[in-house]
Image (cartoon, rainbow, N blue to C red):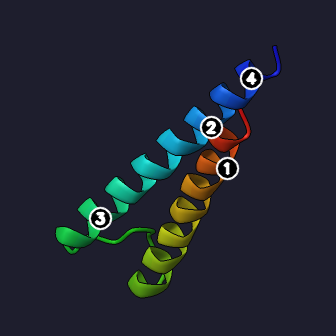
C-alpha cells in the first residue's frame, strides 16, 4: 500500500530531472540563455545541479519500494 506514493513520487522527480536536463542541454547547444538576465554559465550550472538532484531523489524513492 505504501509503494504507490513512492512510485508516483519517484516518477515525478525522474521526469522532472530528465526534462530539465534535456531542456538545459538543448538551450546550451543552441547557445541560447538558460535564464534571461543571468550569467549563462551560472544558470546552466544551477539547472544541471537541480536536475541531477531531482534524478537522484527519484532514484532514491524508487529504491525504497
Name the residue beneath numbered marker 3. 25
Whether pointer 3 and pointer 2 mark residues with C-beta atoms closer than 8 Å, the reply is no
The residue drawn where x is 27% and y is 71% is 28
Comes first in the chain, label 2 or label 4? 4
**SS assignment at label 4:** helix
Cα–Cα span, label 2 and label 4: 10 Å
Whether pointer 4 and pointer 1 mark residues with C-beta atoms closer than 8 Å, the reply is no
Cα–Cα span, label 3 and label 4: 33 Å
Comes first in the chain, label 3 or label 4? 4
The residue drawn where x is 48% and y is 40% is 15
Name the residue beneath numbered marker 4. 3
Packing grade of label 4 (10 A; few <14, some 14-19, many >=20) is: few
Cα–Cα span, label 3 and label 2: 22 Å
Comes first in the chain, label 2 or label 1? 2
Q: Quadrant of the N terminus?
A: top right
In this rendering, would 33 be left or right of 54? left
In this rendering, would 1 be left or right of 41? right
Q: Which mark's residue is nearer the viewer, 1 or 3? A: 1
Whether pointer 1 and pointer 3 mark residues with C-beta atoms closer than 8 Å, the reply is no
Name the residue beneath numbered marker 2. 10
Cα–Cα span, label 4 and label 1: 13 Å
**Residue 37: in sight, yes or no?**
no
2 or 58, which is in the foreground?
2
Comes first in the chain, label 4 or label 1? 4
In this rendering, would 19 be left or right of 42? left
Mark number, residue 20: none
Amino acid at each position: 500500500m505504501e509503494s504507490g506514493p513512492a512510485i508516483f513520487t519517484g516518477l515525478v522527480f525522474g521526469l522532472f530531472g530528465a526534462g530539465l536536463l534535456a531542456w538545459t542541454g538543448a538551450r546550451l547547444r543552441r547557445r541560447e540563455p538558460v535564464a534571461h538576465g543571468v550569467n549563462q554559465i551560472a544558470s546552466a550550472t544551477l539547472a544541471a545541479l537541480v536536475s541531477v538532484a531531482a534524478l537522484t531523489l527519484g532514484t532514491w524513492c524508487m529504491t525504497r519500494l
